[in-house]
Image (spheres, grey):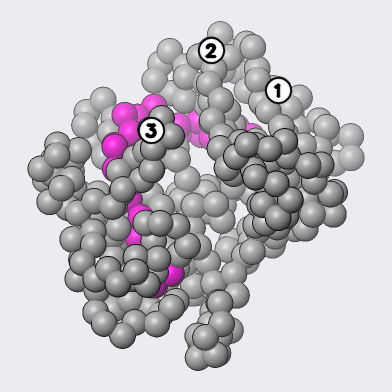
Amino acid sequence: MHLLAAAYIPELPHYYRGKVRDNYDLPDGRRIIIASDRLSAFDRALAVIPDKGRVLTQTARYWFERTKDICPNHVLAYPDPNVVIGKRLDILPVEIVVRGYLAGTTGTSLLTLYKKGVRQVYGLSLPEGLRDNQALPEPVITPTSKAFDGGHDEPLSPDEIVSNGLLTQDQWQTVSRYALALFARGQALAAERGLILVDTKYEFGTDEDGRIILADEIHTPDSSRYWMADSYADRLEAGERPESFDKDFVRAWVTERCDPYTDEIPVIPADLIERTAAVYRDAYHRITGETIEPIAPDQDILSRIRANLAPYFS
């Protein structure tokens, strides 16, 4: 009752299930997006984390409302704490990541590439002598291709994006302007909360008139990296990893015990799941200044969502 592992509602049309979100497309061009409590990694659902879906939806709401003067977004309504009604868009085939620091662990992150000796990437020229987790001279956009069918994201330069027909020159300029302005707003508001917004992913789409619209989520703990501002300088000087919202307890626990891509996942301890839930709740409080209220003991989350979405039933 207190977890939302899935949100299949047969009265709603055109259901499809993403890694974390369950979606329904309405005939009038609206999309119902329900954030479940699933924790996804290694191309599979590992666990169900209490309050995760609510935290992601409400954190994104906080940021959508504080950035709508910069760029239009897909939000139409919030009928439930786990649900957003959005405008259905044609998602652009380029993933936009803005980075303010030399950080990251993935194969396409600036830090990973920099440590390999790469200085020319994403159409950028990186200076020599940068340290791990150091601030870049200015925030930069590091776009990648969107991987399909098990492929991997690949770095792109602005010239490649336009010459390959992924975006027009006007679209690229608009997306770039929006992304850098959103990131600047995010960094400024995060600083007021004692946080550093390190990097983030944005997803953009186009509506029926070709307008570029911000979609999906914005500045959530799943789409963004945050560091604690008060300890950053000391940790950088000591060569230590900056203090962050470390919510990877479950991922780390699983990888220590099996090959998560091929093996059966062991039963994950309840205390590990609760620690992860506590990190998400704490992240919401630190980012927004608000508190996720506990769910009433007798409340069934899916029943609540069904009741709130009844006006959208066919």
Q: Does residue 110 appear left or right of residue 229 in this picture?
A: left
Q: In the figure, 21 relative to 143: above or below?
A: above
- The residue under label 2 is 13
> Which numbered disc flags the more N-terminal residue, 3 or 1?
3
In front: 101, or 85? 101
Q: Amino acid at mark 1?
A: Ala
> Which numbered disc flags the more N-terminal residue, 2 or 3?
2
- Crowd tier of the residue under label 3, counting other residues whose Cα lies within 10 Å: few below 14, some 14–19, many 20 or above: few
x, y percent for residue 277: 74, 53
Q: Amino acid at mark 3?
A: Phe
Figure quadrant of the N terminus = top right
- Crowd tier of the residue under label 2, counting other residues whose Cα lies within 10 Å: few below 14, some 14–19, many 20 or above: some
- The residue under label 3 is 148
Q: Residue at x 84, y 49 (%)?
A: 269
Q: Residue at x 65, y 45 (%)?
A: 259
Residue 148 in sight from this viewpoint: yes
The mark lying in front, picked from 3 and 1, is 3
> Which numbered disc flags the more N-terminal residue, 1 or 2?
2
Disc 3 from disc 1: Cα separation? 35 Å
Disc 2 from disc 3: Cα separation? 25 Å
Badge 2 element:
loop
Disc 1 from disc 2: Cα separation? 16 Å
In front: 21, or 193? 21
x, y percent for residue 115: 37, 72
